[in-house]
Image (spheres, rainbow, N blue to C red):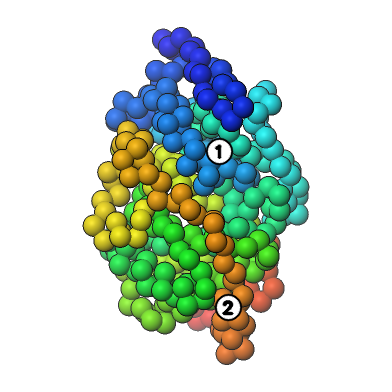
Amino acid sequence: MASARITLTVPGPECDREVGLSSPDRELWPGEGITKRELAEYFSAVAQPFLAANGERPVSLERFPEGIDGERFFSKNPPRGAPDYVETVTVMYNSGRRHPQIVLTEPAAIVWAAQMNTVVFHPWASKRRNTDNPVELRIDLDPQPGTDFADAAAVAPALRDVLAEAGLTSWIKTSGNRGIHLFCPIEPTHEFLDVRHAVIAAGRELERRMPDRVTMNWWKEERGERVFLDFNQANRDRTMAGAYSPRALPGAPVSTPLRWEELADVDPTVFTVRTVPARLAEVGDPWADFGAEPGRIDTLLEWWERDLAEGVGELPFPPEFPKMPGEPPRVQPSRAKRTDDA
């Protein structure tokens, strides 16, 4: 039998909001017994740093009506009946289609998302005042089979050094899974494709320095036991789990901002829906000053142009993207070889 509907009082910037929560005792993480109510209370507890990292941006909601073991789906557009404090902005997708997308601006909107069974939040890298130009350069350090979080943690400082040479300051967080997300705040002077090229330029430079530990190969069969720098996460409408967002995985892990000095010894599995509020109370938000001094990607774009002049060009785009200028064939290398040999 479904539990009775309750109402949570959520403090806001101007007034408290009353947010209804249906089926509050439904277990979203059955293995841990974490309920919908507990998730909503988590969002209320972390609302301020959560909004600082994910607010004012177009965001997709990854929803799990029956818990993380059940069906999932994404909400990009505001569902019918959304309260007036759930705001929107019109964005353009890669297809050229334009449509409103949710924007979070206050704690009640995050708790409302919990009422909609949202577990994972996927914010864009741009803000609503200019959705075409990112305010963040993002790189996903993705350990491949045979590697793990420790391998990504060993690579991340070297990537920070590369980006520092290009005039950028790097901030890190756990992915909430096996990887690390590295973000650099940037001035919104370039559109997504330029930022993608900047990410590729930085990744190639790191790959040259650490060829046995880092790969930029898009095709999994070519990556080996290395950390993949996922450059395609820099594309328009491609997102990562936001800072302080839970993940739909056993243990209810949370994508958690870190200080650089924590990285060498950190165990990412200790950051969960149940532990992160206490961490914030104890050590504060490591990203509290994020965005205070954004950098520029000019130097990285100079590296991109240098590589182009040397014959090192574009890399593959995700399969749902239209064919892009200069892009190599989207054919798995082993399949292309079989075709050539036929």
Locate residue 264: give its quadrant.
Answer: bottom left
Locate residue 284: give its quadrant.
Answer: top left
Residue 61, numbered label: 1
**Alpha carbon distance from label 2 to label 1:** 34 Å
Query: Which amino acid type is shown beneath numbered disc 2?
Result: Thr
Q: Is residue 89 left or right of residue 214?
A: right
Is 75 placed above or below 1 here? below
Crowding at mark 1 (Cα within 10 Å: few <14, some 14-19, many 20+) = many
Confirm whether residue 91 shows in the render: yes
Q: Is residue 271 left or right of residue 87?
A: left
Residue 299, numbered label: 2
> For this rendering, which residue is in front, 254 or 66?
254
Query: Which amino acid type is shown beneath numbered disc 1?
Result: Leu
Nearest-to-viewer mark from 2 and 1: 2
Give percent across and percent down for residue 128. Answer: 68, 47
Q: How many marks?
A: 2
In the image, what residue occupies the spot 67% across and 35% down?
87
Crowding at mark 2 (Cα within 10 Å: few <14, some 14-19, many 20+) = some
Mark sitting earlier along the chain (2/1): 1
In the image, what residue occupies the spot 37% across and 66% down?
156
Is 294 placed above or below 334 here? above
Residue 169, numbered label: none
In the image, what residue occupies the spot 70% across and 57% down?
132
Secondary structure beneath label 1: strand
Q: Which quadrant is home to the N terminus?
A: top left
Give percent across and percent down for residue 118. Answer: 50, 33
Residue lying at the far bottom of the rendered structure = 310
Give percent across and percent down for residue 215. Answer: 41, 72
Secondary structure beneath label 2: helix
Confirm whether residue 334 shows in the render: no
Give percent across and percent down for residue 101. Answer: 67, 41
Is 179 placed above or below 59 here? below
